[in-house]
Amino acid sequence: MKTRGHMDKLLVAAAAAADAGEVPVAAAIVNLDGQIIALAENRMKRDGNALHHAEMLAIQAAMAETGQSRLDEYDLWVTLEPCTMCAGAISHARIKRLYFAAHDEKAGAVESGVRFFDSPSCHHSPEIYGGIGSSKAAALMKEFFALKR
């Protein structure tokens, strides 16, 4: 699996989101052959929709692309640890593996915070690989929020 290449592409997309005034997060759905089939960045401000997190948009695009309501043979890559809403969507979509870069101590719900996938009410948990390219993703977030202050 081209771990470095996927995260590098996501970091470019996350930087584009930041340039558009969005929190710099990007996500991609990757098939078993390692090909990105859907790539999205945060669009909450631009779309005026609090649900338009990168993960939600990538999952939705992948379902449209594949014609499937479940993505059990696909992986999700994201530049920031998913929040509770996105973790719920990951579970319902039956994502096979989750790869993420920076941890989110405040709003993350995978290895931080509520640890959604450890909840007894969670029906499906992906394999989880956190911290991939975390320093670059964390630096992008820090820079974005420093400019907002």
Image: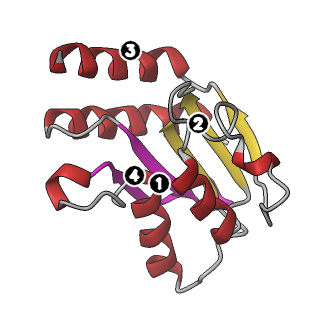
Q: Is residue 2 visible?
A: no
**Which colouring convention does the figure follow?**
secondary structure
The quarter of the displayed image where residue 128 is located: top right
Mark 1 or mark 2: which comes first in sequence? 1
- Rendered image: mark on residue 100: 2
Membership of 36 in magenta stretch: yes
Q: Quadrant of the N terminus?
A: top right
Relative to residue 83, is residue 67 depicted above or below? below
**Earlier sequence position, callout 4 versus callout 3:** 4
Tell me the amino acid under the disc marked 2.
Phe
Task: Using the image, determine if residue 58 lies above or below residue 41.
Answer: below
**Residue at 48% across, 52% down:** 28
Query: Whole-Å distance between the Cαs marked 1 and 2?
Result: 11 Å
Asked if the residues shown at circle 1 and circle 2 are in contact, with their CB atoms under 8 angstroms apart, the answer is: no
Q: Is residue 83 left or right of residue 13?
A: right
- The answer to whether any part of residue 44 appears in the image is yes
Q: Are marks 1 and 4 in contact (CB under 8 Å)?
A: yes
Amino acid tagged 4 = Ala
User: How far apart in space, not on screen, are marks 1 and 3 (Cα)?
Assistant: 20 Å
Q: Earlier in the sequence, mark 4 or mark 2?
A: 4
Q: Is residue 78 left or right of residue 95?
A: left
